[in-house]
Amino acid sequence: MTSENKPNILIVDDDMASNIVLEGFLYPLDYHVQIARDSENALRILDETDLDLILLDIMMPGMSGFELCEIFKSKGITEQIPVLFITSLSDSKSHKRAIECGGKGFIVKPFDEDLIRSYVTTFVGMKRMRDYYQQQLQTYSDFMAMVFHDLNNLNMVVLGNLELASYGSTDTEDSQKYIQNALFALKTTNHFMRNIQDIAKLKAVSHGMEYARIDLVEQIRSVAKLMDTEMKAKNLKIELRASVHTYVCGIGDLLFRLVLNLLDNAIKHSWPDTVIIVQMKEKKKQGIDNLDEIEVVISNQCDPIPKKYQEVLFEKFRQGPNQKERKRGTGLGLAFCKAAIEAQRGRIWVESPLLGYKTGVAIHFTIPVYNTKCEEIENDEQT
């Protein structure tokens, strides 16, 4: 378990001997344990740390555990972090007050080591499961808001342009332009919906995909032909630089959609009258499963992506700069690319600005070269 993933436990007790005993009981669980001997330090740690569980002594000098827990409750903390009281009290009145101020249970003195570990692991697990489902719910909520927003915008583009085309203008060129705009919006809607389906499919099916020998150069050329209309509209060109072995070990349709998304993204954000460069270079035994890789770099001239956006660029439902203008897409295309390339034992990352420049973006991804080692993995996947 990495230090970032370790559950954080706070013990609040003025009795150092009890703290040492509890910390010793929890040591085999590989948790990160912090100790506060008074309420002031407890509140400070609470502000600084994302806690998973609080073990709180009732009988402390100054502010009692009950009073401190009342503060926790007033701040909404007891709804987020379970509190277990440490007590030698056995009367029902004390237990009732502990529950009323937000406590979830009791650790009774003298301590029972097995019972304490059972309590702690159970409540930490419940808290982490709750956090996970809250995050999933928030993600779903963000997703639905984004879907309705983007589909509504695209729908308005279609309706607006078709209405203009239906006004009966004698200018055929204008009518054709409006119809082309509407068709492009419908194409974008279809592309958007397919990204949603692809991400769901990749999440549901992590095994059983069929690897094949794919000519990556030919696949890139095929995608470029599909994007010809969009490139002509901005007077863009694609320059393919491939002087290496181009047969890769990938999943045909998945790799095609990956390249389609990345080139579409480059075209969308490129400045007019510029060149999109697709470069390939072979890397020896640096990939997952110790496979030789081909690194593909798709670079274009555009506004640079700030560092803070680069860190979240491949996350679902996250936008890059110019979010209000929706210039960075739907938040799904690059998330799909990350999932797709990882499903094919590759990696993907962004570089911006371009090396030696103050502008531009380059998307790098790797994919294994097709060779004997790749054939062995393909056979393993099928069996």
Image (spheres, rainbow, N blue to C red):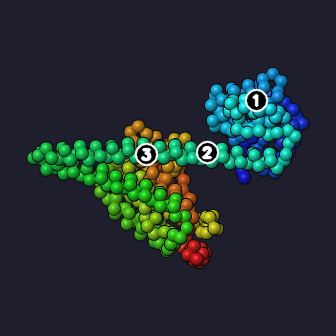
User: Which is in the foreground here, disc 3 or disc 2?
Assistant: 2
Q: Is residue 333 above or below residue 40?
A: below
Q: Is residue 231 left or right of residue 279?
A: left
Q: Nearer the viewer, residue 65 or 232?
A: 65
* Mark 1, residue position: 93
Query: What whole-number distance in Å separates the C-alpha atoms at marks 3 and 2?
Result: 21 Å
User: Which is in the foreground here, disc 1 or disc 2?
Assistant: 1
**Mark sitting earlier along the chain (3/2):** 2
Q: Is residue 249 left or right of residue 51?
A: left
Place of residue 66 in the rendered image (x, y in percent of width and height, measured from the top left): 74, 28
**Mark sitting earlier along the chain (3/1):** 1
Q: Residue drawn at (66%, 44%), measured in percent from left and top? A: 127
Mark 2 falls on what kind of element?
A: helix
Q: Quadrant of the C terminus?
A: bottom right
* Mark 2, residue position: 130
Local crowd size for mark 2, using a 10 Å CA cut-off: few (<14), some (14–19), many (≥20) = few
- The tag on residue 144 is 3
Query: What whole-number distance in Å separates the C-alpha atoms at marks 3 and 1?
Result: 47 Å
Mark 1 falls on what kind of element?
A: helix
Q: Residue drawn at (84%, 47%), measured in percent from left and top? A: 113
Q: Amino acid at mark 3?
A: Met
Query: What whole-number distance in Å separates the C-alpha atoms at marks 1 and 2?
Result: 30 Å
Q: Amino acid at mark 1?
A: Lys
